[in-house]
Image: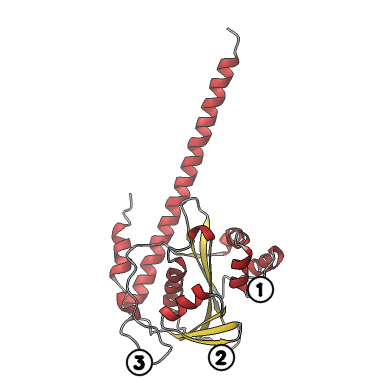
Amino acid sequence: MFDTSNLIKASWGVGMDFWRPPPARAGEATARRPTPYVVPIRSLGANHRDRIAQHLFALEDRDRYLRFGYMAQDAQIQRYVDGLDFERDDIFGIYNRKLELIAMAHLAYAKDHGYESCAEFGVSVSPSARGKGYGARLFDRAAMHAANDGVDLLFIHALSENVAMLKIATNAGATVERDGTESEAYLHLPKPTLDSRVTEMVEEHVAQTDYRIKVQAKQFWSFLGDLQQVRRDAIDAQGRTPR
C-alpha cells in the first residue's frame, strides 16, 4: 500500500520559509509558525458543487451573514454556487471522514483586465468544526497558491464584526482598513520559491490521497452495513419458517 507518511512530513519539511523573512513593508506577509498537525486541504472542482451547496446551506443565519455580508437565503446561496467559475477561480476544501465538506475557501481572481495580480479570499467553516484553525489553514493554502500563481495582492472584504476573519488577516500581516460596518484587508504576498511550489504540489497530492482513502472507507463501511442487513434478514426469515 502506498505510504503517504513521508509525503505528509515533506509537506511541512519544505516551504517553511514561505512566510519568512519578515517583510519590510507594511501590509506584507509576516512570519508564521508552522502548524504542528496536518490538515489535508484539496482543490475542488465542478464535481464538488453539490457538496459545496450542502456545506453552505448548513451554515447558521449569522454565519451566512458574516460570509456573504448579508442574510443569504437558500436561493441566493444556490445562485452563488451555480455561478462558481472553476476555470477562473480556485476553491479549496476540508472533508471529514464522513466525506462532509466542513470548511471551504474561495480564491476569486479579478475579472477585469489589468488586475491579474489581485485576488480575493473568502472562507466558511461549519459550526461543528470551529476552533481547530481550519480558517487560518485554508488562508495559508490559498495564499501560497495565489503567490505561486503570480498574485501580488490578496484582498479580504469582511464585515467589521467578523472578528475571526479579520484576525486571520491581521495574523498573516495584512493591513486592515475599516469603513463603518465593513472592512478591507490587503496582503502583499511574497514571491514564489521552489520550496513553495514543491510544498503546494506535495500538499495537494496528500489531500487527494486522503480523499480517496475516505471514499474507500465510506464505501467499505456501507458494504459491511449491507452485509449485516442481509444477515439480519436471513435470520429473521429463518425464525419465521414453520418447523
Q: Earlier in the sequence, mark 3 or mark 2?
A: 3
Amino acid at the residue labelled 3: Ala
Front tag of 3 and 2: 3
Q: Indicate whether 126 appears above or below 144.
A: above
Residue at which label 3 appears: 24
Q: Residue 204: image x %, image y %?
A: 41, 65
Closer-to-camera residue (167/26):
167
What type is the residue that disc 1 sits on? Tyr
Q: In the rendered image, which residue does mark 2 sit on?
A: 114
Q: Residue at x 34, y 80 (%)?
A: 31
SS at mark 1? loop
Q: In whole angstroms, how far apart are the C-alphas of marks 1 and 2?
A: 29 Å
First in sequence: mark 1 or mark 3? Answer: 3
Quarter containing the C terminus:
top right
The CA span between labels 3 and 2 is 26 Å
Q: Is residue 85 visible?
A: no
Q: Position of residue 8 (x, y in %)?
A: 32, 61
The answer to which of 30 and 152 lies nearer the viewer is 30
Q: Which residue is outermost to the right?
A: 75
Instruction: Give the residue at x 58% y 19%.
Output: 237
Residue sitting farthest toward the top = 243
Label 1, on which residue? 70
User: How dense is the environment of label 2, judged by Cα within 10 Å: few (below 14), some, or many (20 and up)?
Assistant: few
- On screen, residue 109 versus residue 187, left or right, reads right
Is label 3 in a helix, a strand or a loop? Answer: loop
Whether residue 209 is situated above or below residue 156 in the rendered picture: above
The image's mark for residue 19 is: none
Q: Quadrant of residue 230?
A: top right
Marks 3 & 2, CB-CB < 8 Å contact: no
CB atoms at circles 1 and 2 under 8 Å apart? Answer: no
